[in-house]
Image (cartoon, rainbow, N blue to C red):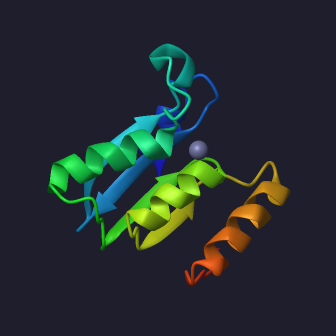
């Protein structure tokens, strides 16, 4: 979690993400849409791409994504496509209404959502 928070300070909108599998950090990312001239260069997307290359598989079945902000709809879709096992929000939500949209989106696709403190 500390690493994700540190990565958040590298980006434009301060968001950092890391992906852990089998207790090993296999990928990390931070927001870079402006620097990369890429509207999809969100922290989660960058980390997902790096993780998929790392394990040579687009499915990240037993992976956990730690992210410093609730995922947007684009990232939530990518997380679902990657079959990420667990998403951990590192910070308090600044925009709970956005998370509600993401949760609804996930529920439609049959994802089980668990909350823990
Ligand atoms: Zn996003």
In the image, residue 66 above or below residue 50: below
| Residue 116 visible in the displayed image | no
Residue 64, quarter of picture: bottom left
Quadrant where ligand 1 appears: top right
How many discs mark residues in the rendered view?
0
- Which residue is found at the position 47% from the left and 60% from the top? 79
- Residue 49 position within the rendered picture, expressed as x and y whole percent measured from the top left: 32, 45
| Camera-side residue of 32 and 105 | 105
The quarter in which the C terminus is drawn is bottom right
Residue 90, quarter of picture: bottom right
In the image, residue 19 above or below residue 5: below
- Residue 62 position within the rendered picture, expressed as x and y whole percent measured from the top left: 30, 73
| Camera-side residue of 2 and 113 | 113
In the image, residue 115 above or below residue 92: below
- Which residue is found at the position 39% from the left and 70% from the top? 83
- Residue 46 position within the rendered picture, expressed as x and y whole percent measured from the top left: 40, 39
- Which residue is found at the position 46% from the left and 71% from the top? 86
């Amino acid at each position: 979690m500390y690493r994700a928070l540190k990565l958040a300070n590298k980006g434009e909108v301060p968001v950092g993400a890391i992906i852990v599998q089998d207790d090993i950090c296999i990928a990390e990312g931070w927001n870079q849409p402006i620097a990369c001239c890429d509207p999809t260069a969100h922290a989660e997307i960058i980390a997902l791409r790096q993780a998929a290359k790392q394990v040579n598989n687009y499915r990240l079945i037993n992976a956990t994504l730690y992210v410093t902000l609730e995922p947007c709809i684009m990232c939530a879709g990518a997380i679902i496509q990657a079959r990420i096992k667990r998403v951990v929000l590192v910070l308090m939500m600044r925009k709970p209404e956005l998370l509600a949209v993401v949760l609804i989106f996930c529920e439609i696709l049959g994802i089980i959502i668990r909350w823990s403190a």
